[in-house]
């Protein structure tokens, strides 16, 4: 009854629109009580839970650095200038294609699907409305582009989490991810180009330079923090030093170009950037350390489960079923089915990723293969389920209905392509 009760708690939080953290806290108490009933002492149980937390402690610190960086990119004018430059490239006849590509670009630079949707996604939605484009098509293109970078950006929380869970190097993972994503990406571009030709977009796009000019000095120099993170990532500089260098570049831009007071800068780093203009705020507010606390708490609580699951044998039956499925098909197919079920129940990307890593790790002799398959399955599948926060939050931001997921072609072309190209693995000794 332990796992069904935990699943029920997750569903209750979903139906009542409560934070999933309540269900995760309930799950932790439930698993501790189960372990106590199995004969473990409280000391053993707490020590086991803390082992899982210690395993992800590095990524929790990285999350905080990401929060600071994304806030200062807003305050320094980096994101506003990026959005303004990108918006000039949009033409009615290629609107959907550019919508997809521009969200891909911004998500690759910032590593956040929610942050991309709240900025570039909202801008694309406003332009689409002005041009008379179907909001479902716009929502699908935005969702696809936002998760392109959420999956393979060096500053993505999901990519960092997968690298931490599998003990792999994120830059090696990204190189392999780009390779497997090439065909789905090109097919998605073709689909959006064809849909754009049939959408009959017309009308004028909003003047973003005038809008953002109320709050920022739109200087090309503001692109420096983005250029730094891109160049250092290409040079394979570790993520935290690269982000720190980007932050250091953003600080003088905030102080001397945007004329922000030092107190405003410190406040933004902690609580996030808040624009004084209401229209600008609707597109750009966000970032900061506080914005990362929710995802950090989800990862922390989820990590505490791993040792408890192992010591109490809660997942033993599920592992056997997954092995049987992998024997009949292949490892990726088994992981994809597991990911679909995990995302459907947990309703979020982080917990689903950690569950899939623990349940399916034994299928993979090589850690790098597990990392790649996690990125090509659970990370994108979470965004295809309308009741998952990975899907519902971005679509709500751009004002698109749940049916927009049908137009998020990259998100289902990627796992489908991997299913077609995955081979039956040879039987070798696994690392888990």
Image (cartoon, rainbow, N blue to C red):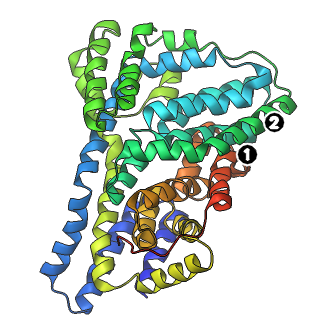
- Residue 249: give its label: none
For the C terminus, the image quarter is: bottom left
Say which element carries label 1. Answer: helix
Please report whichever mark, 2 or 1, sits nearer to the chain's N-terminal start: 2
Query: Few, some or many C-alpha atoms within 10 Å of disc 1 (few <14, some 14-19, many ≥20)?
Result: many
Number of marks present in the image shown = 2
**Is 262 placed above or below 115 here?**
above
Q: Quadrant of the N terminus?
A: bottom left
Closer-to-camera residue (343/414)? 414
Percent position of residue 96, x then y = 73, 31
Q: Are marks 2 and 1 in contact (CB under 8 Å)?
A: yes
Quadrant for residue 419, please give it.
bottom right
Residues 275 and 69: in front is 69
- SS of the residue under disc 2: helix
Residue 87: percent from the left, percent from the top? 62, 18
Q: Looking at the rendered structure, which numbered label has been put on residue 195?
A: 2
Whole-number angstrom distance, CA of label 2 to CA of label 1: 10 Å
**Within 10 Å of the Cα at label 2, are there few (<14), some (14-19), or many (20+) other Cα atoms?**
some
Say above or below: 217 vs 432: above
In the displayed structure, 115 sits above or below 316; it is: above
Camera sees residue 408: no
In the image, 29: left or right of 315? left
* x 36%, y 41%: residue: 291
Percent across and percent down for residue 260 are 29, 13
Which residue is under mark 1? 407
| Residue 11 located left or right of residue 166 | right
């Amino acid at each position: 009854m332990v796992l069904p009760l935990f699943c029920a708690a997750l569903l209750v939080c979903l139906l009542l629109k409560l934070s999933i953290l309540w269900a995760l806290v309930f799950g932790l108490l439930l698993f501790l009580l189960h372990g106590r009933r199995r004969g473990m002492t409280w000391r053993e149980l707490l020590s086991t839970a803390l082992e899982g937390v210690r395993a992800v402690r590095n990524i929790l610190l990285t999350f905080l650095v990401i929060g600071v960086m994304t806030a200062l990119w807003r305050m320094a004018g980096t994101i506003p200038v990026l959005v303004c430059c990108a918006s000039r490239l949009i033409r009615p006849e290629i609107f959907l294609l550019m919508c997809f590509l521009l969200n891909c670009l911004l998500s690759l630079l910032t590593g956040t699907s929610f942050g991309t949707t709240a900025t570039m996604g909202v801008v694309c939605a406003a332009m689409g409305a002005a041009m008379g484009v179907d909001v479902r098509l716009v929502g699908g293109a935005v969702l696809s582009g936002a998760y392109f970078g959420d999956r393979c950006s060096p500053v993505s929380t999901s990519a960092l989490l997968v690298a931490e869970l599998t003990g792999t190097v994120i830059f090696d993972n990204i190189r392999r991810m780009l390779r497997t994503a090439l065909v789905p990406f090109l097919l998605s571009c073709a689909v959006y180009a064809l849909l754009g030709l049939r959408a009959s977009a017309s009308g004028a796009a909003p003047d973003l330079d005038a809008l953002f000019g109320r709050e920022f000095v739109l200087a090309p120099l503001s692109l420096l923090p983005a250029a730094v993170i891109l160049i250092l990532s290409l040079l394979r500089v570790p993520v935290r030093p690269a982000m720190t260098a980007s932050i250091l570049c953003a600080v003088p831009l905030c102080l001397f170009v945007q004329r922000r007071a030092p107190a405003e800068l410190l406040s933004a780093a902690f609580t996030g950037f808040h624009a004084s203009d209401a229209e600008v705020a609707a597109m750009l507010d966000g970032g900061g350390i506080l914005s990362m606390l929710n995802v950090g708490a989800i990862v922390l609580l989820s990590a505490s489960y791993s040792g408890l699951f192992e010591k109490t044998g809660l997942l033993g039956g599920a592992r056997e079923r997954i092995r049987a499925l992998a024997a009949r098909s292949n490892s990726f197919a088994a992981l994809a089915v597991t990911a679909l079920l995990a995302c459907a129940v947990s309703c979020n990307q982080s917990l689903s990723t950690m569950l899939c890593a623990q349940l399916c790790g034994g299928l993979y002799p090589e850690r790098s293969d597990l990392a790649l398959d996690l990125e090509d399955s659970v990370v994108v599948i979470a965004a295809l389920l309308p009741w998952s926060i990975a899907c519902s939050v971005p679509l709500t931001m751009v004002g698109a209905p749940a049916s927009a997921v049908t137009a998020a072609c990259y998100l289902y072309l990627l796992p489908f392509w991997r299913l077609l190209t995955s081979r039956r693995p040879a039987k070798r000794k696994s690392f888990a």
